[in-house]
Amino acid sequence: KFNYALFGNPVDHSKSPQIHNFFSKQTGLLHTYTSYNVLLSNFNFSLSDFFQKDGLGANITAPFKEEAFSLSHQLTERAKIAQSVNTLKKVNNECILGDNTDGIGLLSDLIRLNFIKKQYSILILGAGGAAKGVIFPLLSFGCSIFILNRTSLNAQKLVTQFNKYGKVNVFDPCLSSTKKFDLVINATSKNIEKKEDFFPLSCISSHTCFYDMNYQFDNTPFINWCIKKGYKSVSNGIGMLVFQASHSFFLWHNQFPETDYIINLLNKNY
Ligand code: ATR
């Protein structure tokens, strides 16, 4: 039995089990994939227990990605740079390897949607864990990044973490009132409703695309806001979720599953 799992709090509404079960059937690599909703103080214990028994790999979701980073025995380069881990794999029967597939998952979906090109100027809204996981792959692709956050100090911290890998700056609308962005990515928490706008509308041009890293049963507040404004190139984060899962699957099994079918299916049921 090949045993994989998701650890987080909460995990009830996660689509990861459905996605991994689909990948398993589609590739014939049969495994079990269980969700564990663990108490904040219990993560270390639950994870050790899982890997000591028959666990071979895990996905880690909020709020444990930074703890998973600290608990990993070895790290991939991209996990080291992000300082955050969403995928674990048992290697040589004892060592736990930590990886981060969130950024490559987002980049893969932006490429699928034709939302990104090298040299694009990207505005990221938010400077929490979700933003941290995706900045490095976007910089490596050749884009420049501006971060706009409620607490500017948190945006500055991310700039300090990532500026050795490419062009990343805090976005100050007062100083750059003529700046236009090719892509706006929402990396703030999903339920934020805003009476005011999410960002200054002066930085939008007719070809700007909008991506929400969140997904939920119906449209997120950010997607609803984009629709209300009449923006056309708008996407939720379901594709990112499927692609990060496909890169985790690749780390575990050395094989990429097919992704289009499950993205369309989840979007239809959404
Ligand atoms: P995650 O790990 O999912 O990114 P997080 O670390 O709590 O979650 O970060 C959430 C992000 O949403 C942060 O950038 C946060 O801004 P602060 O750094 O100022 O806390 C942002 N955020 C949360 N609630 C917000 C609100 N009501 N308005 C604007 N930004 C908000």
Image (cartoon, rainbow, N blue to C red):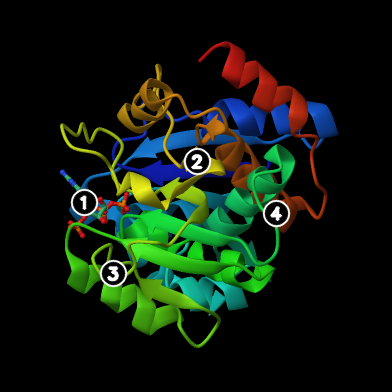
Q: Quadrant of the N terminus?
A: top right
Horizontal relation, residue 220 to residue 241: left or right? left
Q: Earlier in the sequence, mark 3 or mark 1?
A: 1
Q: Secondary structure at mark 2?
A: strand
In this rendering, position of residue 217 left or right of residue 59:
left
Residue type at mark 2: give it: Tyr
From the image, tell me which residue sits under label 4.
Answer: 252
Q: Circle 1 sits on which residue?
A: 40
Marks 2/4: CA–CA distance: 28 Å
Q: Nearer the viewer, residue 190 or 121?
A: 121
The residue labelled by disc 2 is: 211
Q: Amino acid at mark 4?
A: Trp
Element marked by disc 3 = helix
**Mark 3 to mark 4 CA distance (whole Å):** 33 Å
Q: Is residue 117 above or below residue 76?
A: above
For marks 1 and 2, give the CA distance: 30 Å
Q: Residue at x 45, y 42 (%)?
A: 213
Left or right: residue 221 compared with residue 142: left
Distance CA(mark 2)–CA(mark 3): 19 Å
Q: Nearer the viewer, residue 216 or 142?
A: 142
Of the two numbered discs 4 and 1 on the same chain, state the one appearing first in sequence: 1
SS at mark 4 in the image: helix
Question: Looking at the image, do the residues carrying marks 3 and 1 touch, with CB atoms under 8 Å apart?
Answer: no
On the question of residue 13 being in view, the answer is no
